[in-house]
Image (tube, coloured by chain):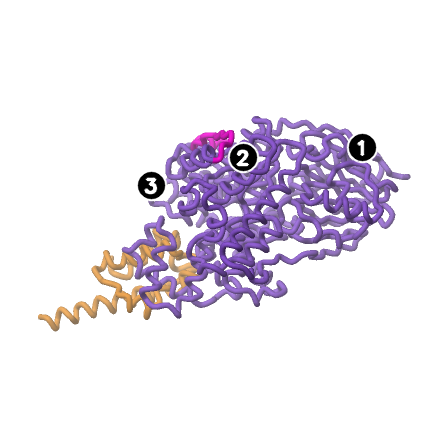
Amino acid sequence: MCGIAGFVAPSLQGGAAAPETITAMLSHIRHRGPDEAGYYLDDGIAMGMVRLAIVDLASGQQPMPDASERYWICFNGELYNHLELRAELERLGRTFRTHSDTEVVLQSWIQWGPACLPRFNGAFAFAIRDAESGELFLARDRYGKRPLFYTDRPGAFLFASEMKAFRAFPGFRFELDPRELETIYSVWTPLPDRTPFRGVRQLPMGSVLTVRGEHRALHTYEELGVTAEPFGGSEDEAAAFVRETLRRSVELRLRSDVEVGVYLSGGLDSSIVTRLATELSPYEVRTFSVEFEDRTFDESSSQQIVASHLGTRHSSIAVSGTDIAEAFPSAVYHAEVPAFRTAFVPMYLLSRHVRTAGIKTILSGEGADEAFLGYSLFRETLLRASWNELSDEERKAKLADLHPELAHFGPAHQKHMAGLFRQFSVEQLPGLFSHELRYQNGRFAARLVRDRAEPFADLLELVRTTPDYAALSAVQKAQWLEYKTLLPGYLLSTQGERMGLAHGVENRCPFLDPAVVRAAASVNLRFDDGFTEKEILKKAFRGELPEVSITRRKQPYKAPGSAVFKAQRPDYLELLLSDTELKQLDCVDPVFARKLVDKVMSTPDAEISTKEDQAFVYLLSTAVLHRQFVRNREDVMGTPSDAELKLHTIVDRRGA
Amino acid sequence: MNRTEKIRQFIEDRFLVEFGGDVTSGSDLFKAGVMDSFGYIQLMSFLEDEFGIAISDEDMLTSVFVSLDAIDGFVAGKLSERQGDAACAG
C-alpha cells in the first residue's frame, strides 16, 4: 500500500519549483510508503507516490508507464482479482512487463477505459495521466477503502491520499468549514465527498474524476448496491453459500508477497476472518489485539479464547488512559477529521506494534455489521418501522431486547422509552427514518457550531438525489447510510486506514468484497426476522468457532473518552480550558463550548452522558486539528514519522 | 423555586442550554438539539420523583413532551388532578 499526490498547475512549469513541491508533498505522506518513492513531471503537471511494497516487490516501481509511455499511473492500494484480469487482458493481446497489480490496472484502463472500474475487486485510489490528450483521471474503489482528496483553486488542481500533503503547495492554507463541521458533529462523519476543510473535497467512493484543462467531470461508475435477488435455496444452503463466499474473499486477500496478520477484536466478525485465514494461509497466522486497563472496555478474555481455539500466534498491547492522552494529537494528525470517540487512538498504537512485529498487511472484520445487519440500529429501525402495528406487549418485549446493556432501556424506564419511540415511529427527515434517533442526539454536538443552519440539509439532499434510494426498505436505507457515512467516514478511515498507514500497515476487509455484500443482501431477513444479530452468519460458522464467539452479544469497540483527558490533563487540553485559545476556533460557539467543557471538567465521569462525552471529544479533536492544520503549529503534530522518503524513480518530461 | 423554575433549571443544567435566547419555553427541544433519548428518560424520571407524580402508559401515548411549556403544562395538570382527588377524598 502506498500514498499518492500530485498537481496540475501551469504556473509551476519550469525550474525547481515543481520537483521541490512534489517532493515536499510526498514527504508529508511518507509514512504511507516507507519502501520507496518516485514522481513524474510534465509541463504543468506532477504526480508521485510513496510505496509500501506488497505485490511484486522487485519491479512494481511507480509512477509506471505503459510501453508507449503515453499513459502513466500512480496507484495506491491492491487489486485482489489482478490474476484473473491479467489473464483476460493477455487473451486480448496485451503484454505485461511486470507481475504487479499496478500494471494490470494500467492495462485495464488502456483496454477498457473507465469501463474497467466496475471490474475491479480491490481497495484502491489512483491517478492516470494520458500524456497525449493531456487528461488526468482520478478514481476510487466502490466502498471508499482508500482515500483520495483534492482541491481545485484558480490555476492549481491538487490531489493526494492525505490532505496534509497540500501543506507543501505554495500559497495553500487550510481553513475549517463551519457547515461541514456541523454535518460531521451531527452525522458523526463527513459526507462522502466532503472534508472538514473549506474547498477540500474527497473523491466519493465508486467515482472517477476527469481533469482536462479547466474542465472537470465527476462520474459515478458504480452505485452502492444493498439489494439482491432473494436466495432461492434452504437456510442450510444459504449458510453454506455465505461461508463459501467469505472463504473465497479471504483467499483473494491472502494473495500477497508478504505475511498477513489479523486484527482480532474477540467478536464474531474478526473471529470468522481469523478462522478462514488459519484455513487458507501458507504461514502461521498472527493475530493482534488491543487490551484496555479499564475493564469496562476490555475484551481480552474473548480474544485469548479465540486465538487459542484457532491456534494463532497472538500478541496484544495494553492501552492505558495515559497512552490515549499521549498519542491523541498524533492520531488526530493522521485522521485529519474531528472524531466523536477516542477508539481510533488505540488502533494507532496497535498498528505501530504490528509494524514492529514485521507485518505490513492485516485482515479485519470491518463491513460485517453493515452487510449482515449486526448493529442494533437495524433492529431499532425494524422496531420503529413496525411500531404502530405491534401490541403493547410486543413493543415492550422488543424494546427490552434492544439494548440490555443500557440502563435507560431497562424495565424501570420502559414506558418512557415507549413514549419516545412512539414519537420516532413516523419519518420526520425524508429518507433518514432509520437514523432519526441517533441524529437527534447528534443535534446536541452540532450546537458547538456558532452559525448554524439545518445540520442534515446536505444529507437530505444526497438521499433525495440518489437514484432508486426512495424504493429501498427502511433497513436497506439504514444500510445505505452506514455504507456512505460511518463506515468510510470513520471506521475504514479514522479508525482504520489512516491509523494503519501512520505506521505503514495496510488493512484488508474480507466482508467488503462485492460478492460478500451481495450474498448478505440475498439472505438477510429471508430466514429470520432480523432481531437475532447476524443469525445466518453465526449459522455459517457454528462448530468452527468457540461458543463464546457465537453466543456473545455484539460489544461495540470503544475506548475511554473525556475521562482520560480530565485525569491526564495533557498540555493540549489548554486549547479548551483557556478562553484565549478557545476563541481561536472562530467557527465554534464559545458560550456552549465553555458550558460543555466546564461541565465535563467539574462533573464525576459517571454522570457525563454519551452525547456530552462525544461533543467533548469532537471539540478537543477539532481544536487539535485547528492548531495542526490551520495554525500550522508543529508542536502538537505528534511524533514525526521515522520513515524516510526514498526517491527511486524520477521522470522529467518537461519541455520534451 | 416554583414548579416551572424547577423544571427549567433541570433542563438548563442537564442539557447545557439557557432559555431566553435561541431556545424559548415554546421551542421543540428535540428539534433544537437540546434533548436526546437518554436525557428524555432522565427528564421523565426527574418529573416523577420531584413532583411525586406518576406518568402512566396512557400519558406517554397521549402527551408530547417536547417543549418546556408542554412539559410544565402536563405537570400542572397532573398536580391539579391529584389535588382534585385529594379534595374529593377529603
**Chain identity for the colour purple used in the image:** A
Looking at this rendering, what residue extends furthest in the bottom direction?
B88
Left or right of A76? Residue A306 is left
Please, what secondary structure does the residue beneath circle 3 have?
A: loop
Mark 2 and mark 1: span between their CA atoms?
32 Å
Q: Which residues are magenta?
A: A310-327
**Chain identity for the colour orange used in the image:** B
Please, what secondary structure does the residue beneath circle 1 have?
A: strand
> In the rendered image, which quarter is residue A337 located in?
top right
Callouts 1 and 3 in the same chain: yes
Amino acid type, mark 2: Tyr
Left or right of B28? Residue A271 is right
Left or right of A415? Residue A616 is right
Residue of label 1: A650
Whether residue A181 is in magenta: the answer is no
Q: Give coordinates of residue A101: x percent, y percent.
A: 73, 40
The chain letter under disc 2 is A
Of the pair B18 and A199, the residue shown nearer to us: A199
Instruction: Kindly tell me whether residue A375 is visible in this rendering.
Output: no
The C terminus of chain B sits in image quarter: bottom left
Looking at this rendering, what residue extends furthest in the right direction?
A656
Is label 2 in contact with label 1 (beta carbons under 8 Å)? no
Q: Which mark is residue A604?
A: 3
The chain letter under disc 1 is A
